[in-house]
């Protein structure tokens, strides 16, 4: 009886190892992509929460008017401003992430009308964070309460 492996047995083992490596690399890449997109969505949520807090807080010697949420032309930077004054952000998400909304400014929070302060003044209250061909995370601001929610794909 011979000791050792035949060439066919070795080739089968190499093929199986190659297949498992390919599958695991693809899975790791997908998980990494989803994680980066989730981190970006959390960053956007933080800016929106900060902007909403500014909109509902009492102000003295501060700019007045709606808090406008804008995405820069690079589609990676989000900022909340009143006029030209930044009140939240700017925050730039990691490379490869794209932020989009239906208009620019994406939407505005009311700051002056006491009955509706903190509510959306304009826009649909949605921003999308996406990386590559993956499903986008949707960051939504409630039209009435101003609460910020992230919806996962």
Image: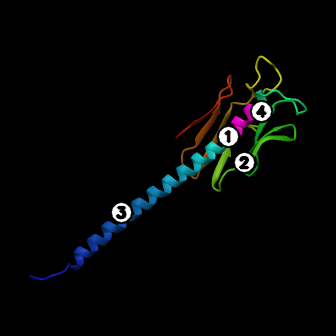
Q: Secondary structure at mark 1?
A: helix
Q: Residues within 10 Å of mark 2 (few under 14, many from 20)?
A: some
On the image, numbered disc 1 is attached to which residue? 46
- Can residue 133 be seen in this snapshot? no
- Which quarter shows the N terminus? bottom left
Q: Earlier in the sequence, mark 1 or mark 4?
A: 1
Residue 9, picture quadrant: bottom left
Q: Looking at the picture, how far across and down is residue 95, in whole percent? A: 65, 56
| 3D distance between C-alphas at marks 1 and 4 | 12 Å
Query: Residue at horizontal 76%, vertical 20%?
Result: 116
On the image, numbered disc 2 is attached to which residue? 91
Seen in the picture, residue 151 relative to 75 is either above or below; the reply is above
Q: Earlier in the sequence, mark 3 or mark 1?
A: 3
Q: Secondary structure at mark 4?
A: helix
Query: Residue at horizontal 67%, vertical 42%?
Result: 44
Q: Looking at the picture, how far across and down is residue 117, in whole percent? A: 77, 23
| 3D distance between C-alphas at marks 2 and 1 | 9 Å
Q: Residues within 10 Å of mark 4 (few under 14, many from 20)?
A: some
53 is within the stretch colored magenta: yes
Nearest-to-viewer mark from 2 and 3: 2
Q: Looking at the picture, how far across and down is residue 150, in whole percent? A: 59, 36
13 sits left or right of 22 in the view: left
Q: Which residues are magenta?
A: 46-54
On the image, numbered disc 4 is attached to which residue? 54
Q: Earlier in the sequence, mark 3 or mark 4?
A: 3
Nearest-to-viewer mark from 2 and 4: 4
Q: Secondary structure at mark 3?
A: helix
Seen in the picture, residue 105 relative to 4 is either above or below; the reply is above
| 3D distance between C-alphas at marks 3 and 4 | 51 Å
111 is within the stretch colored magenta: no
């Amino acid at each position: 009886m011979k000791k050792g492996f035949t060439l066919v047995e070795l080739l089968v083992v190499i093929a199986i190892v190659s297949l498992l490596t390919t599958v695991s690399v693809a899975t790791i890449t997908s998980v990494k992509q989803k994680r980066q997109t989730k981190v970006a969505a959390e960053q956007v949520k933080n800016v929106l929460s900060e902007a909403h807090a500014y909109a509902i807080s009492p102000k003295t010697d501060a700019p007045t008017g709606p808090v406008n949420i804008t995405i820069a032309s690079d589609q990676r930077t989000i900022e909340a401003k009143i006029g030209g004054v930044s009140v939240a952000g700017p925050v730039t998400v990691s490379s490869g992430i794209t932020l989009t909304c239906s208009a620019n400014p994406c939407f505005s929070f009311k700051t002056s009308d006491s009955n509706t302060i903190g509510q959306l003044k304009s826009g649909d209250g949605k921003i999308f964070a996406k990386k590559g061909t993956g499903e986008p995370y949707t960051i939504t601001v409630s039209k009435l309460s101003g609460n910020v929610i992230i919806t996962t794909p």
